[in-house]
Image (cartoon, grey):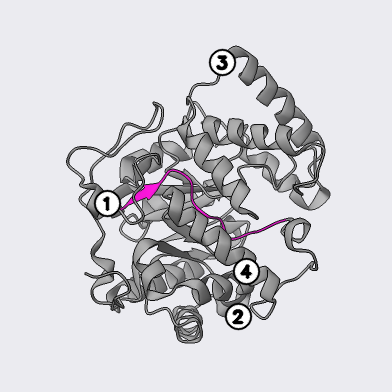
């Protein structure tokens, strides 16, 4: 397939690979000998690629998350942005292109603007090089009236039509944040929508995202065929429960995991993320320590931080290349930063404390 050629939904990019693992705990890894670099979109030998569970896709060890918190410190304006904002869209294009240059090959969306901003940038050439992870909270199951298969499929269909995307690589349907409050019937409707999207070729793989680990564990165990990829919070201080962990279920059913909120909703940092912040270098180091810590868990396929500049993209690529194991001094530094992170979580982020043990 030539660069720039449009890819049809039925062709599904042609970049899915066999379910083959990579060494996940060392420093930057090339892929297993059984996986040709030519099969990996945006392959860069300086990037690590991990198998996204039973999807078999090899994805970069860091992805581009949907939330771009503090982007106003780089582009000005805000707090809300749109695809009509030229400076904002220029920033997003620069970030996407830098991701592709360093080997980051997947992005994720949550909010309305994220869906359409990134879709607008997915020219045929970029689409060939980047996996699209899709969620769209405005048209999904956080709203009670949308918790039916018919309504959820309408939301997906309308978004695909408006965005110009023919399909997404994984649809991680966004449910109620406290997922355990979904009724059994609502969960069945969610799963039915995911099934239909797969059958119609609108999503290659499916799953859900939630802040509720107990709920997620239950859904994977009851509907393993539909749970290819899941998203949940996993911070720089998250740890696996010694008994009855969500990760026990993830291991059993070979589920791909993308970790959200790696920096505690930005509470890990001392500065405001602007290039002129006096804490800029120290916060960049903390970001790398956090990513190295998270990637030490081989069941986290990739954390997906929102990145607001090409410098932040480069910093994430550097984190992947650095030694994975933290030394004693680094571990102490991250521990101190984590204690401050928990202490300064805003009121509307107190739920994140539930992610300390998963």
Instruction: Name the residue tied to disc 4.
Output: 90
Q: Position of residue 356 (x, y in %)?
A: 63, 35
Frontmost of labels 2 and 1 is: 1
Q: Residue at x 30, y 54 (%)?
A: 55
Residue in the foreground of this view, choosing between 118 and 136: 118
Q: Element type at marker 1? A: loop
Instruction: Name the residue tied to disc 3.
Output: 327
Where residue 56 is drawn, which disc sits there? Answer: 1
Frontmost of labels 1 and 4 is: 4
Q: Answer above or below: position of 267 versus 123.
A: above
Q: What secondary structure is the magenta-colored segment mainly? A: loop
Specify the quadrant that holds the N terminus. Answer: bottom left
Quick one: label 4, few (<14), some, or many (20+) residues within 10 Å?
Answer: some
* Magenta highlight range: 57-69
Task: Using the numbered discs, state the Cα–Cα distance from disc 2 to disc 1 in whole angstroms.
Answer: 35 Å
Q: Element type at marker 2? A: helix
Task: Using the numbered discs, state the Cα–Cα distance from disc 1 to disc 3 in whole angstroms.
Answer: 33 Å
Quick one: label 3, few (<14), some, or many (20+) residues within 10 Å?
Answer: few
Task: Using the numbered discs, state the Cα–Cα distance from disc 4 to disc 2 in whole angstroms.
Answer: 36 Å
Task: Using the numbered discs, state the Cα–Cα distance from disc 4 to disc 3 in whole angstroms.
Answer: 39 Å
Query: Do tag 4 and tag 3 residues touch (Cβ < 8 Å)?
Result: no
Q: Residue at x 38, y 72 (%)?
A: 192
Q: Earlier in the sequence, mark 1 or mark 4?
A: 1
Query: Do tag 1 and tag 3 residues touch (Cβ < 8 Å)?
Result: no
Instruction: Name the residue tied to disc 2.
Output: 145
Q: Earlier in the sequence, mark 4 or mark 3?
A: 4
Specify the quadrant that holds the C terminus. Answer: top right
Where residue 17 is drawn, which disc sits there? Answer: none
Asked whether, in this view, residue 70 is left or right of residue 54, the answer is right
């Amino acid at each position: 397939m030539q660069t720039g050629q449009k890819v049809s939904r039925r062709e599904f990019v042609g970049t899915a690979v066999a379910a083959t693992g990579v060494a996940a705990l060392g420093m930057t890894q090339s892929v297993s000998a059984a996986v040709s670099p030519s099969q990996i979109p945006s392959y860069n030998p300086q990037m690590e690629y991990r198998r996204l569970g039973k999807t078999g896709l090899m994805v970069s060890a860091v992805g581009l998350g949907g939330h771009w918190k503090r982007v106003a410190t780089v582009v000005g304006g805000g707090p809300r942005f749109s695809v009509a904002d030229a400076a904002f869209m220029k920033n997003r294009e620069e970030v996407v292109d830098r991701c592709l240059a360093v080997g980051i090959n997947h992005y994720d969306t949550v909010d309305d603007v994220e869906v359409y901003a990134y879709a607008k940038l997915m020219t045929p050439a970029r689409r060939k090089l980047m996996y699209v992870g899709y969620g769209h909270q405005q048209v999904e199951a956080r709203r009670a009236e949308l918790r039916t298969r018919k309504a959820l499929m309408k939301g997906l269909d309308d978004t695909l039509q408006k965005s110009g995307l023919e399909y997404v690589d994984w649809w991680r349907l966004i449910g109620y944040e406290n997922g355990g409050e979904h009724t059994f019937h609502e969960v069945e409707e969610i799963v039915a929508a995911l099934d239909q999207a797969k059958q119609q070729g609108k999503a290659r793989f499916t799953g859900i995202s939630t802040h509720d680990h107990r709920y997620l564990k239950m859904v994977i165990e009851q509907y393993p065929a539909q749970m290819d990829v899941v998203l949940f919070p996993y911070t720089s201080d998250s740890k696996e429960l010694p008994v009855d962990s969500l990760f026990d279920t993830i291991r059993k059913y070979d589920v791909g995991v993308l970790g959200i909120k790696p920096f505690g909703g930005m509470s890990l940092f001392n500065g405001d993320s602007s290039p002129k912040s006096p804490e800029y270098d120290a916060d960049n180091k903390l970001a790398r320590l956090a990513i190295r810590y998270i990637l030490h868990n081989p069941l986290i396929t990739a954390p997906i931080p929102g990145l607001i500049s090409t410098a932040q993209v480069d910093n994430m690529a550097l984190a992947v290349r650095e030694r994975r194991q933290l030394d004693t001094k680094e571990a102490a530094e991250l521990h101190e930063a984590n204690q401050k992170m928990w202490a300064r979580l805003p009121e509307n982020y107190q739920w994140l404390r539930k992610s300390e043990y998963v």
